[in-house]
Image (cartoon, coloured by chain):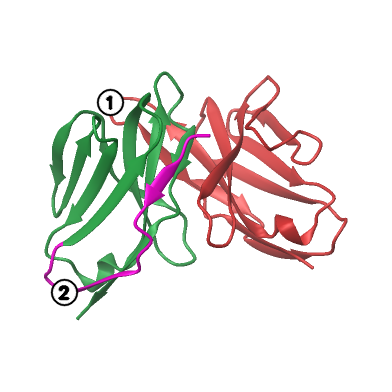
Chain colours: A red, B green
Amino acid sequence: SAVISQKPSRDICQRGTSLTIQCQVDSQVTMMFWYRQQPGQSLTLIATANQGSEATYESGFVIDKFPISRPNLTFSTLTVSNMSPEDSSIYLCSVEVTGSNEKLFFGSGTQLSVL
Amino acid sequence: QKEVEQNSGPLSVPEGAIASLNCTYSDRGSQSFFWYRQYSGKSPELIMSIYSNGDKEDGRFTAQLNKASQYVSLLIRDSQPSDSATYLCAVNDRGSTLGRLYFGRGTQLTVWP
């Protein structure tokens, strides 16, 4: 299993500002993933973050809006830039644990409200 | 665009009953299928995975997969009030890393005593 610490757990931000969300894992993992869960919507993958390379973004998400860092095998950050009310959502970090029983574990999430 | 559809619910069942949750997916290339449980205000938690046609049982949970019909379901036997949560169906592409999942919007289940 994996223990994932994510912070902040929630924040209220002003339009036009940026917020950086941190994700710390208790073990080394190759891949980390950032998801968004908007109210009433499904979880949507934003990007995949590998250590030592640029993040891979899904359709509809761009690096300028959601820059990601992955400085080592246990840590990643997601920044939500130039925020608007449409960015109000839960942001979730997740990691893949491989082996005989592969699983995707989620962090506790960051509840973001943009005024 | 890969789509994963779930019956919208909410679904309400009495304690001890069988809860049936359904999910269809649009991409025939999907290879791996998952059910997550999400309590209000909490992060999703994996409860079942299934990769081949047929049934897979784990305790009170049974996942059923029919790739020809592009359909996956979750049965919860002897439902308990603690099962009250939103259940998310997720699918994964062939050859894609496990972390790249496509989720449905979820079905809210309430089990009343």
Q: Say which amino acid is labelled 2.
A: Glu
Q: Is residue B67 left or right of residue B77?
A: right
Number of labels in the image equals 2
Residue at 46% from the left image edge and 40% from the top image edge: B3
Is residue B7 found inside the magenta-colored segment of the image?
yes
| Front residue of B52 and A90 | B52
Name the residue rendered at 79%, 68% in the picture: A115
Residue B113 drawn above or below residue B1: below
Identify the residue at image location x=51%, y=41%. A94
Mark sitting on residue A100: 1
Task: Report which quarter residue A11 is drawn in.
Answer: bottom right
Q: CA distance from mark 2 to mark 1?
A: 34 Å
Q: Quadrant of residue B83?
A: bottom left
For residue B15, the mark is 2
- Judging from the image, mark 2 belongs to the subunit labelled B
Secondary structure that dominates the magenta span = loop
Against B68, is B3 above or below? below
Q: Which residues are magenta?
A: B1-18
